Each structure stands twice: as structure tokens, then as C-alpha cells.
């Protein structure tokens, strides 16, 4: 798993296998949780469509307020997240960024 950013008690990440998907997305993992729909992942969020910024939920187990906070953080850090995703997919090590 390519951990990109820490936000509140969540980890925003990508998986190397995601590089072959046709639409870029982020997995949201609740830190310390072992009970969720798909492993520790509690949401999947699309962040683009056809190379253009388009942030929307694919699915989520989050509360409405958690979703809103995470979507806002992704919007505010969209360019940086895309850069980090490029680095992960290129096999480079990245420094996980903590955002508030």
C-alpha cells in the first residue's frame, strides 16, 4: 500500500495495482481499525475523470461529516495527491504528509 497522507485518524493511500485502473482514486483507511467492508479500507474516492479533477465517492462506510471533511481535504490537496500518486506508481519512496 502506498500511504500518501495522514488526515485526522485516516490514512489516504493507493495500491500499486491501482496504476492499471482507468480512473484515479484514493483508498481511505481508518487508522487502528480492523472492522470494515474491505480490509481496513473504509472508503474509495474517485479523484479524477478523463484526466480532469472530479472528486466523488465510489463507496463509503464513513459518516456524512467524515466524508465531507475528507472530500474537502482531497480537494484542497488535489495537486499534491496526484504528484504523490505518480511517485508511488513510479516505484519511488515518498514521505507521508500529515495534513490538518
Image: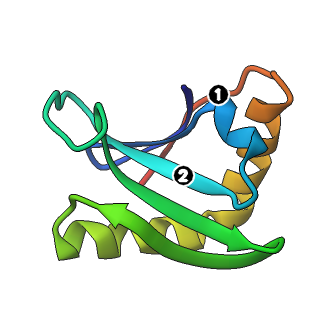
On-image quarter of the C terminus: bottom left
Q: Is residue 34 above or below residue 8?
A: above
Residue in the image at 48% along x and 62% along y: 45
Return the residue at label 1.
95
Return the residue at label 2.
26
Image position of 52 (left or right of 9): right
Image position of 38 (left or right of 62): right
Residue in the image at 71% along x and 77% along y: 53
Q: Nearer the viewer, residue 16 or 92?
A: 16
Q: Earlier in the sequence, mark 1 or mark 2?
A: 2
In terms of secondary structure, where does tag 2 sit?
Answer: strand
Q: Is residue 57 above or below residue 17?
A: below
Q: Are there few (<14), some (14-19), or many (20+) residues within 10 Å of tag 2?
A: many
Residue 23, percent from left and from top: 70, 61
Residue 49 appears in which quarter of the rendering?
A: bottom right
Q: Are there few (<14), some (14-19), or many (20+) residues within 10 Å of tag 1?
A: few
Residue 9, percent from left and from top: 26, 43
Image position of 42 (left or right of 58): left
Mark 1, mark 2: which one is toward the viewer?
2
Residue 12, percent from left and from top: 47, 45
Q: Nearer the viewer, residue 50 or 97?
A: 50
On-image quarter of the N terminus: top right
Residue in the image at 62% along x and 67% along y: 47
Residue 95, percent from left and from top: 64, 27
Disc marking residue 17? none
In terms of secondary structure, where does tag 1 sit?
Answer: loop
Residue 31 appears in which quarter of the rendering?
A: top left
Q: Nearer the viewer, residue 89 or 20?
A: 20
Residue in the image at 74% along x and 20% along y: 93
Amino acid at each position: 500500500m502506498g500511504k500518501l497522507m495522514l488526515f485526522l485518524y485516516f490514512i489516504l493511500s493507493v495500491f500499486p495495482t491501482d496504476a492499471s485502473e482507468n480512473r484515479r482514486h484514493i483508498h481511505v483507511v481508518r487508522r487502528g481499525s480492523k472492522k470494515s467492508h474491505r480490509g481496513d479500507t473504509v472508503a474509495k474516492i474517485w479523484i479524477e475523470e478523463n484526466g480532469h479533477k472530479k472528486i466523488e465517492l465510489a463507496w463509503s462506510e464513513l459518516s456524512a461529516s467524515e466524508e465531507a471533511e475528507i472530500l474537502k481535504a482531497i480537494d484542497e490537496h488535489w495537486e499534491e495527491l496526484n504528484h504523490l500518486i505518480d511517485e508511488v506508481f513510479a516505484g519511488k519512496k515518498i514521505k507521508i504528509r500529515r495534513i490538518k
